[in-house]
Structure formats: C-alpha cells, structure tokens
Amino acid sequence: MTNLWSSRRIPLAWLLLSRQPARLAVALAGIAFAGILMFMQLGFRDGLFDASVTVHKLFDADLVLISPRTMSSIGMASFPRRRLVQVMADPAVSGITPVNWNLLLWRNPQTRSTRSILVLGFEPADPLFTDPSIAVKAQGLSQKGRVLFDQLSRPEFGPIASWFNQGKVVETEVAGKRVRVSDLVSLGASFGADGNMLTSRETFLKLMPSTPPGSIELGLIRLVPGTDIQAASRRIKALLPDDVKILTKQGFEEFEKNYWRSSTAIGFIFTLGSAMGFVVGCVIVYQILYSDVSDHLPEYATLMAMGYRLVGLLGVVAREALILAALGYLPAYVSTQLLYGLVRSGTNLPVAMEPQRALLVFGLILVMCLGSAAVAMRRLADADPAEIF
C-alpha cells in the first residue's frame, strides 16, 4: 500500500486549473472561439477552391487538352480541334470529346433579368460526364436550340426546374438567341459560374456565331483501362506542337485551384483570418496562464524551497497548456461540424470537415497553448523564496 501511494502523482496542473472554474471556463471558451475561427476560415478557403472545380470533377476523361493561353475556367482560350484529333494516333487513346466552353448571358424567363451562365457545347453522342444518365438526356440535344439546364444552379436563373417538372415548356434566351430546355441535369454551381447549361456544338456555334467551327476550348481524352496515365501524357505531349497544353484530370483541377489560390486575394484573405484567430487564442491562453502563475507564485516558491527543481515546475505549466489545448479543441471541433452543416445548407458551398484540416487546427491550438505557456513560464522564474517570504 505504501509503494502504491508513493507511486501516485498529484495532478497539480489539473488542480491549479480547476481551482477556479470560472477562469477555466473563460479560457476554454477563448480557445474554442479561436479554434472555430481557424476552422471556419480554412473551411471557407478550401470550400471555395473545391467549388471552383465542381464541373471539372465530373468530366469523363483521363487527360485534358487546353490552350496555353487559358488562365482559368472564366477565361478559356480556344485552340484548333485538329489537335485533339491528332491525339487518336496514340494507341492508348480510346476516345475523345471536343468541348466548347464559354460564359453567356441567360435571360430569366420570369423576371427578364440576365445573368452569366456557363455553357458547354459537345457532340451529343460523345461521353462528357461520368454520370450515365446525362448521356441519355444528351440525345435530345441533337435537335437545334435544345439545352440541358443544371437544376443545381443559383435561383437567380429562374424557376426552371420547377416549371419543367410541372410539365411546362420552358423557353428563354441565351446570348439573345431562343433556346428550349429539353431536360434537367444535376451538376452544381461553381465559384466561377453560378449555373451551367449543356448543349450541342451546333447550338453552341449558333449562340456564338463568331466562334470558328474548327476551334474548341477543351479536349477530353479517354485512355484504355490500365494505361499508365503519366506515360501516355508524355507521349502525347511529344506528339503535339506547343499551341496546346496537356494535363491529367487531377492536374486540370489543380490548375483551376491554383488560379484562384495565387491570382486572387481569396487565399490570402482567409489565411489571414486564420492567423488572426491563432493570435487571439495566443493572447487569451497567455493571459490565463500568466494570471494562474502569478496567483500561485507563493506556492511555487514554497515548492522550490522544499527542493523541487524549476524544471519540474515549468512542466506543471506545460501540462496546464496541454490540458487547455485538449479541452478547448473538443468544443471547437463539435461546433464547427454544426456550422459547416449550416453553411452547406445555406450556400451549397462544399465545406466539410477533412482529417487534414482537423489535425492542422489541433496542431495550431497545441502550438498556441504551448507557446503561450513558454512565455508565461518567465514569470515562474521569478519565484524566489527569499524575495517572496
């Protein structure tokens, strides 16, 4: 029994924190607030980047051809369609889909207001997206002037889905030309476009008569299953001249994300918001730990007079920081999950808790607490028994 008692360690760090429940509650609330702020800022940033490739993710392609002059999906440059045809010379290529891509003005048939919508023109017989139901609906695009409307588009385009499901004939104008909705698809609005519309290349050229018939903005390439995508990409790159750029599907998504990340202020703004949350948390934790050390300075001095080393007492403050980090992170994580759900339902922004972000924020909170504890430990070094007593 004596050995069991001597082996027990007094949870001094927890006792010091829990001695004043109100102060502990304030500290945990401050850490949780800082965590929620970092979670939300990083979530918004990553959500906006993911939203920029909503359509990109759906393409039925292994490789993608674009023009070297293309900067992003909101400014796609054209290139000769024959470059995509040349790709068929590689034995690993199983199929291609030429795509016209542009933002045109859609007229709301109810309010008569106009709004930019992303229009994709393709051959109805060619695969465009991985969703097989879209290929079936695309057969109706063989008739000129027919379009497929994305029912997940912003409501500012009008009650298109509601009218169509009621059996009404839905007609409107795109780029000043009359079109009729032949069916609905579910793609989702992106950061660069509030809505999407699919049509045949024939109808697309009618909507944009200035577009040369032999030019496209996007070339989708499908490879034989089991093909080494990177090796095929290198072969095709060597086959084609420099007036086109070849990317893997994932590379095409990263190409779009990098535009919004590096060419706009979005990444900087939300990263700065996360940094502000980190600083706020540091200040709160430092004030709590510094006040705790100051209030118990006589007790610390007594322990030092009894023979306790300063390093051991510094470990007590460090354990206080670890306890605050763990207890403060939990409510931040749970609250953020609820807030992410509200954001998804209210904005359709693809914001979700990812393991990497959860670990990142926990690491930041841990650094925040331990860093603040390291600064507060300077006060503990002043615990000189001769001066206090």
Image (spheres, rainbow, N blue to C red):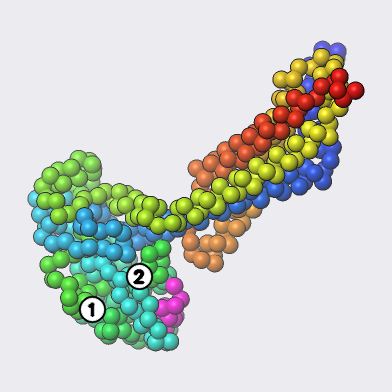
Q: Name the residue under label 1.
A: 207
Report the residue that reaches farthest toward the front: 387
Report the residue that reaches farthest toward the top: 3
Of label 1 and label 2, which has the lower sequence position?
2
**In the rendered view, does 277 fall on the left or right side of 206?**
right
- Residue 17 percent across, percent down from the top left: 79, 36
- Residue 289 percent across, percent down from the top left: 74, 36
Would you say residue 124 is visible in this rendering? no
Q: Give the range drawn in magenta.
A: 154-163
- Residue 297 percent across, percent down from the top left: 83, 29
Residue shown at the point (80%, 25%) measured from the top left:
383
**In the rendered view, does 204 fall on the left or right side of 91?**
right
| Main secondary-structure element of the magenta-colored stretch | helix
Residue shown at the point (78%, 42%) measured from the top left:
24
Residue type highlighted by circle 2? Asn
Q: Which of 314 and 197 is in front in this view?
A: 314
- Residue 208 percent across, percent down from the top left: 21, 76
Q: Name the residue under label 2.
A: 196
Asked which secondary structure carries label 2, the reply is: strand
Residue type highlighted by circle 1? Leu
